[in-house]
Image (cartoon, rainbow, N blue to C red):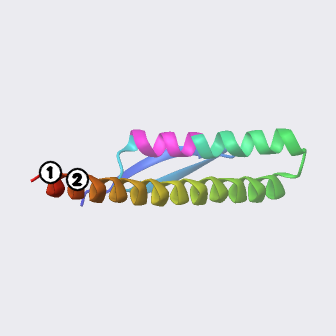
Amino acid sequence: MEKHKTSVYVGGKEYVLVSAEPPAYMQRVAEYADRVMRETAAATHLPALQANALAAVNLADELMKAQDENTRLRRQLREAMEELQALREAAK
């Protein structure tokens, strides 16, 4: 698996990320993290370290909600596929 080095700015600092993901994707990820950090700092007026910790918690919350939704949708899809299979078998 090829690794890519990508320079990104997060929280006003430059970081070099090494990832199997394309550089454009890593730029998107870094830009999103940076935006969340800036928005959190502006909304709370907390010192940078505390605002960044709060931003990390908010991002983790978004991730967990997205994972839960993904699990729910996969379960719903599986149930629909099982129902479709049962209907197909009943129609034979």
Residue 85 image point, x, y percent:
21, 56
The residue where tag 2 is placed is: 87
Badge 1, how many Cα within 10 Å: few under 14, some, many 20+?
few
Q: On the picture, is 62 further left or further right than 78?
A: right
The residue where tag 1 is placed is: 91
Residue 19 image point, x, y percent:
39, 56
Q: On the picture, is 39 further left or further right than 27?
A: right
Q: On the picture, is 52 further left or further right than 64?
A: right
Marks 2/1 in contact by CB < 8 Å: the verdict is yes
Residue at point 22% right, 53% down? 87
Vertical order, 1 against 39 (above or below): below
Res. 39 image quadrant = top right
Q: Quadrant of the N terminus?
A: bottom left
Q: Label 2 sits on what residue type?
A: Leu
Residue 17 image point, x, y percent:
47, 54
Q: CA distance from mark 2 to mark 1?
A: 6 Å
Vertical order, 34 against 54 (above or below): above
Say whether residue 73 is magenta: no
Residue at point 39% right, 51% down? 5
Foreground pick, 67 / 11: 67
Report the span colored magenta: 24-31
Q: Main SS of the magenta segment?
A: helix
Residue at point 71% right, 54% down? 58
Say whether residue 29 is magenta: yes
Residue that lies at the very extreme toward the right in this rendered image: 45
Foreground pick, 33 / 4: 33
